[in-house]
Amino acid sequence: MADTIEKSIYQALLVAVQGVTLPTGWQKALPGVSFEPSTSTKFVSFEIHFNTSIETDLSLEMDPIRQGFVRANVMLPKGSAIVDAYEAAGKVRAALRRGTKLYRGGTQVRIDQDPALANLMTGDTHHQVPVTAFWRCYPPVPA
């Protein structure tokens, strides 16, 4: 039995975030993988989200356009140079830049706009810079 389109999309995006190269000393927290940072850990946590699909075919015979986003939360311990958080955020942005095409099981996932860096937020132990990359998966066009 073939994989579902959702599984192929998720796996393509997961492989992409696994391939993000972070600055020296930074760690990745991947979806579904246990990770317990300390108050001094520099890390980026990744999330993969699906949003509502877009129907484009009035007959409802073609698959919809599936869409969602990847959120990377760049987490820098308080007391560190904030510019380091923006350096890591820039690495994530570059890895998921506009024009990125990911393939898995005959499925293409595209990132058609540059990822957005949100404002710096300060929590109890870490500064956070969210990076959001929006993705879409278009259905194959019938011949």
Image (tube, grey):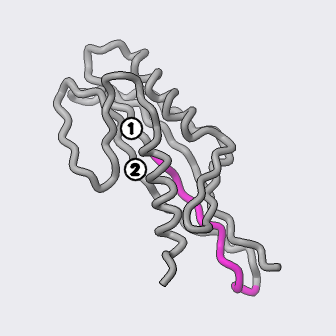
* Kind of element beneath mark 1: strand
Q: Which label is found at residue 119? A: none
Q: Is residue 2 above or below residue 96?
A: below
The answer to whether mark 1 and mark 2 are in CB contact below 8 A is yes
Whole-percent x and y of residue 61? 70, 86
- Image quarter in which the C terminus is found: bottom right
State the residue at coordinates (29%, 56%). Answer: 32
Q: Residues within 10 Å of mark 2 (few under 14, many from 20)?
A: some
CA separation, marks 1 and 2?
8 Å
* Kind of element beneath mark 2: strand
Q: Find out whether residue 62 is within the magenta segment.
A: yes
Query: Which residue lies most toward the right here?
Result: 143
Q: Which label is found at residue 73? A: 1
Q: Which residue is mark 2?
A: 47
The tally of labels here is 2
In the picture provided, is 45 more to the left or to the right than 67?
A: left
Q: Earlier in the sequence, mark 1 or mark 2?
A: 2
State the residue at coordinates (18%, 41%). Answer: 36
Residue numbers of the magenta segment: 59-71
Q: Is residue 123 above or below residue 135?
A: above
State the residue at coordinates (26%, 23%). Answer: 77
Q: Is residue 79 above or below residue 96?
A: above
Q: Is residue 20 above or below residue 23?
A: below
Quadrant in which residue 85 is drawn: top left
Whole-percent x and y of residue 142? 78, 79
Whole-percent x and y of residue 19? 46, 42
